Amino acid sequence: MSDTLRPSRPRPPLDETKAGITTGALARQIGVSPTTLRSWDRRYGLGPAVRDDGRHRRWTPRDVAVLEEMCRLTARGLAPAEAARLARQGDGTAELALSTDPLTEGQSPARDEGTAPSDGGARRECKGLVRAAVRLDAVTVQASLAAAVHRHGLVTAWQEVMVPALRAAGRRWASSGDRYVEVEHLLSWHVSSILRAETLAAPLPDPARGTALLACVPAELHTLPLEALNAAAVRAGVATRILGGAVPAEALATAAQRTGPQALVLWSQSRSTSSEPLARHLAAAQWGVRGAMTRPLVMTAGPGWTSDVAGTVRPRTLPEAMRLLRGACGGGAAVATPVPGT
């Protein structure tokens, strides 16, 4: 695991005779604000080796290497003070410290979704992920997400690393006058990328066991939770079709008629996008296998649904939604779904 976040290619030898760069240029290079660089200098002694006239800072290649290591270690979730100490040493003890972390030592990769226990390691990884996103460090963000899924499994990584990081990015945006919009967009894009990569890496499910149709309600544009459910379902052997965000009501009904899924998931992120009339209509519609003992499962998923809709079920968590999907589409116990009006 410690190799996951290492640079993909070796660094060239440092040329200490090369003129140093300014604080502004360094800040742009590593994605840390000049204020943060000055704070790291003051608090942890990570300052430049050269200060022209005692005032102007010039950062040498060696200084830059130390700060890049500082960024890498904080992205792994280490506290800044500890990361600074290890970065200054530059003797390989950082990898040793990470590899013998008592929070993760002895853990094997959690590839079975939802089986990895929650621990402080996930919380630390979330903090590191947010730090990398704030720096717009796309390489580290992608590697951190892949490492989280590898270590904890997809469901746990989603619930305890990705979702808290996305919420933290959203809070920064909301409280800073739109200053961090780019951070949330970068993090969302990479979360979506890792979820789709997990979907593509899974064996193809057998559609003969049943299929699930996943879609956002017509006014809903937030797709990441639905993508997480889709990836987890595919990894669990459930065949899916995902239609994405803001699917028109007529298109939803047509897709259900054309494909006859055993389960239909309607995702709504906020109360303003949920539509109980649409959910009732789809639950009462005649689609699916004729003569079946049970009606197809209609799920109203997401925080936008604040009350139960007749003829549907409303899972509160991703593991609960997974249990329902596996029951309806194979891989679990049979699920008797409610009929309209009950």
Image (spheres, rainbow, N blue to C red):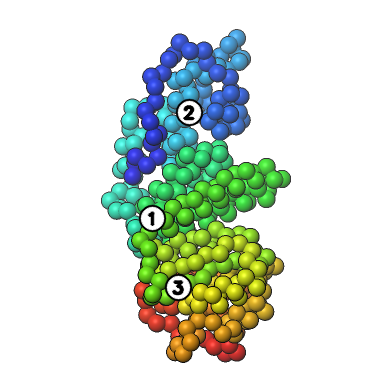
Q: CA distance from mark 1 to mark 2?
A: 35 Å
Query: Could you classify mark 3 by the number of other residues whose Cα lies within 10 Å: few (under 14), some (14-19), or many (20 or more)?
Result: many
In the rendered structure, find residue 201 and report the number of the disc placed on it: 1
Q: How many marks?
A: 3
| Depth order, front residue of 32/12 | 12
SS label for mark 1: helix
SS label for mark 3: strand
State whether residue 313 appears in this view. no
In the rendered structure, find residue 171 and report the number of the disc placed on it: none
Of callouts 3 and 2, which one flags the residue occurring earlier in the amino acid sequence? 2
Q: CA distance from mark 3 to mark 2?
A: 50 Å
Q: CA distance from mark 1 to mark 3?
A: 19 Å
Query: Could you classify mark 2 by the number of other residues whose Cα lies within 10 Å: few (under 14), some (14-19), or many (20 or more)?
Result: many
Residue 134: image x %, image y %?
A: 57, 41
**Residue at the location (69% across, 45% down)?**
178
Q: Amino acid at mark 3?
A: Thr
**Residue at the location (45% across, 88% down)?**
292
Can you name the residue that lies furthest to the front here? Answer: 258
In the rendered structure, find residue 211 and report the number of the disc placed on it: 3
Mark 3 or 2: in front is 3
| Depth order, front residue of 207/31 | 207
Query: Is residue 29 positioned above or below 103 on the image?
Result: above
Mark 1 or 2: in front is 1
Residue 96, picture quadrant: top left
**Residue at the location (41% across, 26% down)?**
88
Residue 258: image x %, image y %?
A: 54, 75
Of callouts 1 and 3, which one flags the residue occurring earlier in the amino acid sequence? 1
State whether residue 24 appears in this view. yes
SS label for mark 2: helix
Q: Amino acid at mark 2?
A: Leu
Residue annotated with mark 2: 67
Can you name the residue that lies furthest to the left here? Answer: 106
